[in-house]
Amino acid sequence: MAHAQGAQTREYGEEALAINARPVSFDWTGVPLEYIPGEPYATHFWNVMHLVLPEGERAMADVFAQALPLIDDERLREEVVGFVGQEATHAASHEGFRNYLRANDVEITPVMRRIEYAVAKIFGDHGITNKRAKRAWLSERLGVYAAAEHFTAVVGEWLLDNAEFDRVGVDPTMLDLLRWHGAEELEHRNVAFDAFQYVDGGYLRRARTALIACTGLAALWFSTAAYLYRNDTTVKRRRPWPIAFAKAARAHLIPGISFLFEQIYYYLQPGFHPSSMGDIDKAVRYLAISPAARAAEQ
């Protein structure tokens, strides 16, 4: 089963890229806490990335590293190794701004407890020793993370396409972090899906874990953004968060709710493969001009 599924991963060989981690760094000195000017809810919506992703991406990197011994396809192994390296760099980059939030007295402790619990207690190894059960739990987590990676890839493309950020004057350092991360997510969009297909490949598991990932991510994202927005003492006129969300989505500062449903619909199609989504050249073009990526090359 694994080898039959693995053969499918080379269908997109003409667009496959060498996946390598870029040692980027970001200087947060002087970056405003409301880095989307006049838009506190939209700012906090993207702040969720800085809180959720470091733990989530490190856990995901660990799971895919565990899957490496099960992957015999040489090219896919190479891509997974590069993917793991990129995810570790993403985690460190977002953690840098998380520390900046803490240093500026943004209270994130309750959120961090919830995220750490989800990563360690819900999606952790659980000390499983039975070989079959351990393999099944690894496949389950690969399925969840493959679905999550689909969402990060399409959000990454959204970030690259979104000219409204330039118009409203998003802080350039933060904008580079968001778009650099989005470009790398688009660049490695196939890897997590292909690794899951190679190790397991079952459609029922793919569909089930996609629904788990979609529901969990949405609940965590909306609740965390609402918490940050509700506790932001600088907000002078605070609307209920669903109204603030709708306003920010209409202004094209965050993806709308329909975006979530469209993407889960595409992912659940039996013949779906991430290579059919979007234009990977967008990632290549942005990584060629990203200030952080260019500095890393030097």
Image (spheres, rainbow, N blue to C red):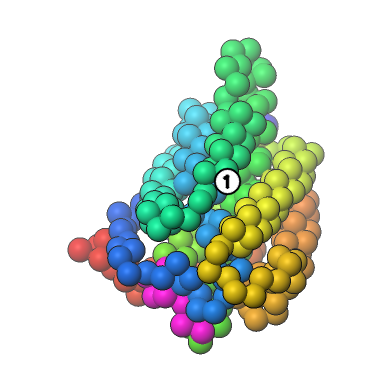
Q: Locate the N terminus and report the quarter of the image it occupies.
A: top right
- Name the element at disc 1: helix
Quadrant for the C terminus, please.
bottom left
Question: Horizontal placement of 68 versus 133: left or right?
Answer: left
In percent of the image, x 66 and y 41: which residue is there?
Answer: 144
Q: Is residue 16 visible?
A: no
Residue 148 position (above or below residue 157): above
Q: Where is residue 265 drawn, in percent x and y?
A: 78, 59
Q: At 31% across and 58% down in the image, what residue appears? A: 24
| 169 within the magenta span | yes
Residue situated furthest left in the rendering: 298
Q: Which residue bears the numbered disc 1?
A: 111
In the rendered view, tell whether residue 259 sits above or below residue 204.
Answer: below
Residue 234 seen in render: yes
Kind of residue at disc 1: Val
Which residue is painted at 64% across and 60% down in the image? 230
144 lies above or below 132? below
Q: Residue furthest bottom?
A: 167
160 or 65: nearer the eye?
Answer: 160
Give x and y (percent) for residue 231: 59, 58
Q: Does residue 66 appear to the left or right of 293 in the view shown? A: right
| Residue 69 image position (x, y, % from top left) | 48, 28
Q: In the image, which residues are magenta?
A: 168-176
